[in-house]
Image (cartoon, rainbow, N blue to C red):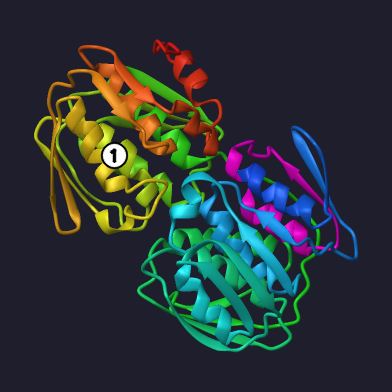
Amino acid sequence: MQRAVASAILAEGITIINNPCKSDDSKAALDVARSLGVLVSGDSTLTITRKPELLTPKEITCGESGFCARLFPPLLGVICDNIKINGKGTLTKRPMDFMVQPLHELGVEYALSNGKLPGQLSGALKGGNIVIDGSITSQFLSGLLMALVKAKEDSIVQVANLKSKGYIDLTLDVMSKFGVNVEHQNYKDFHIPGNQNYTPCELTIEGDWSGAGFHLVGGAINGRATVKGLQLESKQPDKEILKAIRLAGASISTSADSITATGRTLQGFDFDATDCPDLFPPLAALAANCNGTSRINGVNRLFSKESNRAESIMSALSNVGIQTQLKENTMYIAGGEISGGSIDSKNDHRIAMMGAILAINAKQPIEISNTSSVNKSYRDFFQTLAQFGIQVETC
């Protein structure tokens, strides 16, 4: 959704977005569009109208969206020559300094506050050859790719140790729908022709695998859950949740329009979440319900999320009677009886959702703090959970 909105900002004319996501993160991208003078109308279908000239506001805010805060600085470099970028809540604690040097080499100065938001962006993005580190996040690379096609010069972006390649596939797929293209050699060298123009289009937002993964795990650990609206051929990395559920021993069946997870006796599993770190919380809930110990690799991708997600997961599991251990880049989770208790979500949407899934088989209720954090990505999460027969009470 955020990629589509960003593309619509760059595409002069009318873009139609069907099945728009209504999360707070998506709202943040739409708020940026409105700040730039782009007209947004509609509900179940959005009409986004970009007039020939954009506004140049003094400031935009990215809400609490890390993707928004890392996607838009390069894009604003081809739209504005001086603008402040701000954020709210946990976003102001997340690192942004890795963007400063690459942007400088491309003609844009980005002055941050101790490496974090707010930041002041000035200058115009030009093309060129740069090298960036892809081990922290792929979000900034998405912003560079989307922006550099608009630069006057051609560009080559060399990326070292890129993680989450699937998210770059998702970015390139959305860009292609708007008529702009980038070539790459094994995700290491990205060749970006400049002076390309985004063409308005009509597109449909896919169902979100990262949100659906929690419900599929719920079905795998107790009963059955059928989810509609997902695309098996999706480029979203989080569709790997199906692999993990199968590894644990549950059943997955698919049809033309639905995916069903059915519970069986579950065994500990080994899974590498390096390229799909958002799956760590549902994977942890799955592991807690398995016989034996599960090993989930990719912990180093968790430290700069809405919380220190590695610590948040381990603390939450410990509070409900599940033992965990961290060794280098791997989290070990010993499945067992879930006692119930209290979980501090740390205002992290995925920790709140994980706590709710853990409660399905808990001996006693689980109380979760700051559950409104789910609005960040999945406003209707608890209502959907109730449709599966899970009792949800507001404290």
Is there any visible trace of residue 96 in the rendered image?
yes
Q: Amino acid at mark 1?
A: Leu
Residue 303 percent across, percent down from the top left? 32, 54
Which sits in the foreground, 262 or 386? 386
The kind of secondary structure element at disc 1 is helix
Residue 5 percent across, percent down from the top left? 70, 53
Question: How would you rate the neighbour count of disc 1 (Cα within 10 Å): few for under 14, some for 14-19, many for 20 or more?
Answer: many
Using the image, determine if residue 23 lies above or below residue 147.
Answer: above
Q: Which residues are magenta?
A: 1-25
Which sits in the foreground, 87 or 371? 87
- Residue depicted at x 59% and y 72%: 145
Relative to residue 13, is residue 268 drawn left or right? left
- Residue depicted at x 56% and y 86%: 105
- Residue depicted at x 43% and y 52%: 237
Relative to residue 391, is residue 70 drawn left or right? right
Residue 278 percent across, percent down from the top left? 39, 47
Using the image, determine if residue 76 lies above or below residue 329.
Answer: below
Is there any visible trace of residue 249 in the rendered image?
no
Relative to residue 156, is residue 259 drawn left or right? left
